[in-house]
Image (cartoon, rainbow, N blue to C red):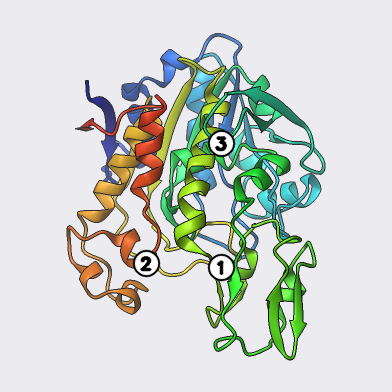
Amino acid sequence: MASQVYFIDFRATFKENFLSKFDRLMKQAGIDNCIGKRDLVALKLHFGESGNTAFIRPVYIRQAVKSVKNAGGFPFLTDANTLYAGTRGDAPLHLVTAITNGFDYAVVDAPLIIADGLRGRTETPVEINGKHFREVYIGSEIIQADCLISIAHFKGHELSGFGGAIKNVGMGAASRKGKLEQHSGVSPKVKEKKCIGCEQCADHCVEQAIEMIEEKAFIHPEKCIGCGECILICENKAVQIQWNADIPVFMEKMVEYTAGVLKNKSGKAFYINFINHVSPACDCVPYNDAPIVRDIGVVASMDPVAIDQASIDLVNKEPALPGSCMINHSEAGMAAGSDKFRAIYPNVDWPLQLAYAEQIGLGSRDYELIKL
């Protein structure tokens, strides 16, 4: 049976502005059915790295908070600390970054709580007995919440092809230990011919796994934690993943972590994807490139697999925007109906995460798109 995915575009009128339309979307998709009276409701989102401006507008989050309160819940905004060195690596920095990016109580009308504590070690093990993990490590505040609402900015991602509900939940809710487990085995290598010896990757490596040898970067795999920051830092694309060996396993691990997060949230999880400012890379980078397609709309569902499949399909139906990075990757990717994320990341077989999620029972790729 096809899962229901509800959709709104960004059109608005005097009779119904976008925030009212967004509220109607959430109600139609069943958000009230997930929330019990006095439930503690975790709104899992990405606050954006400092310097990134593609993240979801805080005023939209305020409307989600209002809708949760109207349903009788007590909402809080949350995310877990990052594995890499950046502006969200511990709770104080993370909160400062969130507030600087506009997620202040005065704006969003809800408190901010970092899900895995001061240094990313406040975690709860969850037994899943999966293909890769017997148990997974999730930020405790998300596990303890009565209800989980994923609010994801749908965009490209250098390791998973795209980032939507599954990545927001599986990667985003994991503690630092959990993120490390997912990335373990994802050890990049340096192409010496492209390395100019700028030392930027070595300077940014939190684990000091990169050494300069004869003016070329060298990554010690035994020290590397697989966070992927060096890939993003290198402007010459000298640092590259061993795609065929690592990425499929990475995506399966991420999906198993999603299963762990949702294990105690049966009937108590809801998903929203904002398909606007669809940047080619994750909001974790301290910048964002021009969007690859127009602002499409927002989707909501009770099914994390269906909502991501629908989001992919909506993006791929669009022609790429002139002036975006798409023209640098593939002229074929510019056309309506082309696979936008495969054009940007040709070595990432993104359907693997959806197929594995469906295989282990997280949801269905078969969906009905209901346009409001």
Secondary structure, mark 3, is loop
- Furthest residue in direction left, as rendered: 336
x then y, percent, for residue 316: 24, 55
Residue 259 position (above or below residue 248): above
x then y, percent, for residue 76: 63, 29
Residue at the image point whose x is 61% and y is 54% from the top: 185
Q: Quadrant of the N terminus?
A: top left
Observer-side mark, 2 or 3, equals 3
Q: Is residue 200 left or right of residue 167?
A: right
Q: Is residue 96 left or right of residue 108?
A: right
Using the rendered view, name the quadrant where residue 355 is placed: top left
Q: Quadrant of the C terminus?
A: top left
Of residues 259 and 143, the one drawn nearer to the viewer in this rendering: 259
C-alpha separation, residue under disc 2 versus residue under disc 1: 17 Å
x then y, percent, for residue 114: 72, 38
Residue at the image point whose x is 72% and y is 82% from the top: 199
C-alpha separation, residue under disc 2 versus residue under disc 3: 28 Å
Q: Amino acid at mark 2?
A: Ile
Residue under label 1: 287
Residue under label 3: 132
Q: Amino acid at mark 1?
A: Tyr
Which callout, 2 or 1, points at the residue further toward the start of the chain?
Answer: 1
Q: Is residue 71 left or right of residue 203?
A: left
Residue at the image point whose x is 41% and y is 49% from the top: 154
Of residues 306 and 259, the one drawn nearer to the viewer in this rendering: 259
Secondary structure, mark 2, is helix
Which callout, 3 or 1, points at the residue further toward the start of the chain?
Answer: 3
Residue under label 2: 344
Secondary structure, mark 1, is loop
x then y, percent, for residue 133: 60, 33
